[in-house]
Image: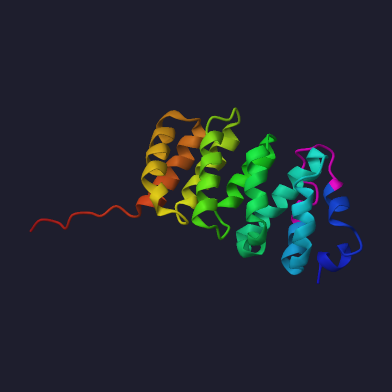
Amino acid sequence: MGNAARLKPETVRSILKSGSHRLDVGRASEVAEMVLETPRRLSAVIECLFDEDAGVANRAADVLEKVTREKPQQAARWNDELIGLMAEADANKLRWNLALTIGRLPLTLVEARRAADILREWLDDKSSIVKTAAMQGLADLTRHDPSLRADVLDTLRILSRSGTPAMRARGRILIRRMEGPLRRSPPER
């Protein structure tokens, strides 16, 4: 059982409280491992996203992002709460982790469109990391709502020319993924 068995007596919040600074990841990786082994613990992580302590909320968002890389369906029952939190979130680390998480979740068309509207607003954020994560989130949302594809591709093309170096690099990667391999004409004979 590894770390999950050792950590069981501790509450999720107390584990996430450990960290010297609100941006410090603390023991987020351990909590993510614990949630992957014991999925019912995810509800405590979700609760911590709304914590008054910014460090706890930030680390909870980091845990959620890690868990949804492997098992996005585990967070599906909280889609509405997570999109609501996105609309209210102002902390950069919370925003960028939610941006990376939201497109992985099994969303309805309405949920995907709500999330896309929020991520479009985040493209004007002061933080380059938030903007870059919002680009990723928008690209991921096109899987749920293909009607977003053309607009997202246009946005990515613009940002891959005019954004920060991180945005330009991420934009190029996302455009390649969304457009697929370039088709070459057969050689003339």
Q: Is residue 67 above or below residue 58?
A: below
Residue at 70% of width from left, 49% of height from top?
62
Q: Nearer the viewer, residue 103 or 70?
A: 103
The quadrant in which residue 126 appears is: top right
Q: Looking at the image, how many numbered discs can be counted on the residues?
A: 0
Q: Can the viewer see residue 30?
A: no
Residue at 22% of width from left, 54% of height from top?
184
Q: Farthest residue in the bottom direction?
A: 1
The quarter in which the N terminus is drawn is bottom right
The quarter in which the C terminus is drawn is bottom left
Residue 31: % across, % down: 78, 57
Q: Which residues are magenta?
A: 17-30
Q: Is residue 37 above or below residue 86?
A: below
Asked if residue 50 lies left or right of residue 111, the reply is right
Q: Farthest residue in the right direction?
A: 9
Q: Can the viewer see residue 51?
A: yes
Residue 19: % across, % down: 84, 43
Asked if residue 29 lies left or right of residue 185, the reply is right
Residue at 75% of width from left, 63% of height from top?
35
Residue 152: % across, % down: 42, 43
Residue at 71% of width from left, 48% of height from top?
61
The magenta stretch spans residue 70: no
The magenta stretch spans residue 26: yes
Q: Nearer the viewer, residue 107 or 103?
A: 107
Q: Is residue 44 above or below residue 92?
A: below
